[in-house]
Amino acid sequence: MLLVPTTVSVPLKTDANGVIRVNQTRITLDTVVTAFLEGATAEEIRDQYSSLELADIYAVLSYYLQHQTEVDTYLLERQNLANFVQQEAEKRFNPIGIRDRLLARRTHV
């Protein structure tokens, strides 16, 4: 039997909000790459996110390793956006004392 090299497509899709997700799941590229960078194996990532196929995880990790600069730039942009959104939310809804306010509501209901 002769094995013929084939091109493997990367199972990444960009959603309407510009978030890159793995295949048809809700799992983001950020999630897979962060788990990998924290030392998780592809099998451990699959165990944690059962909607992912092991082959897809390996393909995503391979893509990351081959395009690390571009992916790291994307991840940094996503982190900056998350920080901005958090700051805006904290301006509108002061987080200081939130636990006490929520507990007080619960006792008055």
Image (tube, rainbow, N blue to C red):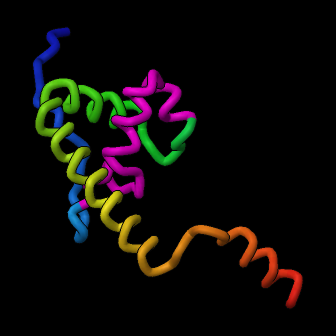
Left or right for 69, reference 23: left
Q: Residue furthest bottom?
A: 109
| Magenta part of the chain | 19-47
Left or right for 4, reference 77: left
Q: Residue at x 15, y 10 (%)?
A: 2
Q: Nearer the viewer, residue 25 or 19?
A: 19
- Magenta highlight on residue 26: yes
Q: Nearer the viewer, residue 88 or 75?
A: 88
Q: Nearer the viewer, residue 74 or 90?
A: 90
x and y percentages locating residue 108 in the rendered image: 86, 89
Q: Residue furthest top?
A: 1
Left or right for 73, reference 105: left
Q: Residue at x 38, y 66 (%)?
A: 87
x and y percentages locating residue 28 in the rendered image: 35, 50
**Image quadrant in which you'd find residue 62:** top left
**Image quadrant in which you'd find residue 60:** top left
Where is 26 relative to 36, above or below? below
Where is 50 relative to 101, above or below? above
Q: Residue at x 11, y 18 (%)?
A: 4
Q: Nearer the viewer, residue 3 or 108?
A: 108
x and y percentages locating residue 49 in the rendered image: 52, 43
- Which quarter of the rendering shows the N terminus? top left
Where is 34 relative to 13, above or below? above
Q: Residue at x 21, y 51 (%)?
A: 77
Left or right for 70, reference 54: left
- Which quarter of the rendering shows the C terminus? bottom right
Q: Residue furthest front?
A: 96
